[in-house]
Amino acid sequence: MQFAIDAFGSDNAPSPEVEGAILAIKEELCEKVFLVGRKEILLKELAKYFYDKNRIEVIHASEIISMKDAPASVVKQKKDSSLVKAIQLHKEGKADGVVSAGNTGAVMAASLFGYGRVKNILRPAIATTFPTQRKPEVILDIGANVDCSPDNLMQFAKLGSLYSRFFFNNENPKVALLNIGEESSKGNELVKSAYQKLEKYKDINFVGNIEGKDLLKGIVDVVVCDGFVGNVMLKTVEGAAFSIFSIMKEQIQKDWIAKLGALLSFPVYAYLKRKLDHTEYGGALLVGLNGISVVSHGRSNAKAIKNAVKFAVKIASSDFVEHTKEYYKGLV
């Protein structure tokens, strides 16, 4: 398999993308990587490493999409950008998927314009894999659609169910609706209406509402919400995890007894940090599109980019996109 990387997407581009691509081929995650961006800069960065030059190809793109660019306009205004040209490679069948750590809205806009939605999908969504106490959990939408209808949430539920089934091999994934209470009468009009629709939707294993306090328990396989709630939830959890580790570090440095205790507990701390580390998961998948676009965190390092390629390979191998198209074919 061959994958395209938007080499000028991350906060520290192109260093993480270049090293991540080299790690991907050295670990035999894929056959070839296309690094898309300003050729002279990429060749200079690649010159720092020893690697199989037949397995990394630089595709020149003169423009860069920044976090300040308006997502809706980048496709037309920056056609020679690293992101748009990477997506074009996938659209033309030269690459089996795209990885970008750039502007999430721009990745969604360019992917939607490049591949188009799966037939009968109202809106594509961003799905992320969430670490929990028991098993990975799929949560969507985490930012693509801040205003949703009950029908949107119902489709997200099915997309998440298909994702969990074909990526994690969950034969009958448990799907829950993120809400302020477990009762069907709780929540705003959107969530209450979505609950009624999901309750009657026989193609998914809907188990009811789930509260925020239960998200990390891993008691369900798929959690559904609108993009506004999902994005706030995700960033709150990320911030809480960062704060907890910062507080622990501050307390450990106060006296030698705390340092001794930390030393004895190091395996536990290391395990927890690894489990909550975003670089382990690579990125989030744009679902509902006729293609594979993986969005990584803006502050991704080489390890995160490498794992994003690994994730994209697994998505391509699972045939998730084809299964999605097959399911929605002919539906009204």
Image (tube, grey):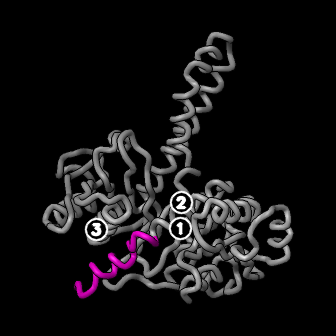
Q: Position of residue 116 (x, y in %)?
A: 45, 85
Q: Which residue corresponds to mark 3?
A: 158
Please say whether residue 326 is one of the residues in the magenta stretch.
yes
Mark 3, other Cα within 10 Å: few <14 / some 14–19 / many ≥20: many
C-alpha gap between disc 1 and disc 2: 6 Å
Mark 2, other Cα within 10 Å: few <14 / some 14–19 / many ≥20: many
Q: Earlier in the sequence, mark 1 or mark 2?
A: 2
Tell me the number on the disc at residue 283: 2
* Residue shown at the point (34%, 85%) measured from the top left: 119
C-alpha gap between disc 3 and disc 1: 19 Å
Tag 2, which secondary structure? loop
* Residue shown at the point (43%, 65%) measured from the top left: 146
Q: Which residue corresponds to mark 1?
A: 294
Q: Amino acid at mark 3?
A: Lys
* Res 35 seen here: no
Residue contact at pointers 1 and 2, CB within 8 angstroms: yes
Question: Which portion, as a residue range, is magenta?
Answer: 316-332
Numbered disc total:
3
| The N terminus sits in image quarter | bottom right
